[in-house]
Amino acid sequence: MKKILIINGNPRSENVAFDDFCVRLKESLIGRGNEVAEIMLRNKRIKDCIGCYSCWVATPGKCALKDDQEEILKAFVNMDLVILASPLIMGFISADLKKINDRMIPLAHPFLRLADNRMAHYPRYDKIAKMGLIIEKDQYYDDNVMKIINKIYSYASFVKFIDNNAEEIADEAYNL
């Protein structure tokens, strides 16, 4: 059994198809014996990172901003897998999902190391959840958009589209 969190970054409640896909994925993951939670970002209060680096200097591992991001940070150290889900908006993930990505810095130390031929921060915790990304294409989607997304999310265990079957994605998540 894996502990899995789906973070739904769909900012528009009228995009029912996207939310329905996340529900089907959640049910499919639960059907495989996983413990699954979901966070709907549009119902959360998450501020923009202000770049103060308090999470490295003043309060190592803790963000100075007090909002719902703390719940998400805790999930990354307590879950086995976090699935980020977002419709593409102008060729990239939603601003809601980007905000939580920007605020992940407390999970790392400020010190750098060479890893996989690139510089990377040392992780602050022994265990950090694996990550997957699920996206819904928009009118701006093309091969260049996908190259950018794959480069930015190169650390993700998978990048899938909602036009993939939820069962297929659940199988891939289960087999990680």
Image: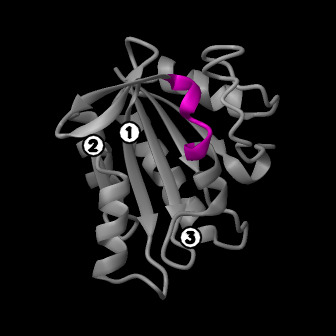
The figure's colour scheme reads one colour
x then y, percent, for residue 174: 27, 35
Dominant secondary-structure state across the stretch colored magenta:
helix
Q: Is residue 97 left or right of residue 35?
A: right
x then y, percent, for residue 45: 81, 43
* 19 lies above or below 14: above
- Please report the residue visible at 58 percent of the width from the left and 25 percent of the height from the top: 106
Find out whether residue 104 is within the magenta segment.
yes
- Please report the residue visible at 22 percent of the width from the left and 31 percent of the height from the top: 115
Residue beneath disc 2? 157
Q: Which residues are magenta?
A: 101-108
- Please report the residue visible at 63 percent of the width from the left and 69 percent of the height from the top: 16
* 167 lies above or below 105: below
Earlier residue among tags 3 and 2 = 3
Residue type at mark 3 is: Ala
Residue beneath disc 3? 17
* 89 lies above or below 11: below
Residue at the farthest left position? 117
- Tell me the element at label 2: loop
Mark 1 or 3: the one toward you = 1
Q: Quadrant of residue 145?
A: bottom left
Q: Is residue 32 left or right of residue 27?
A: left
Q: Quadrant of residue 18?
A: bottom right
The Cα atoms of the two marked residues, 1 and 2, are separated by 6 Å
Task: Work out whether residue 24 or residue 133 is closer to the camera in this orientation and state it.
Answer: 133
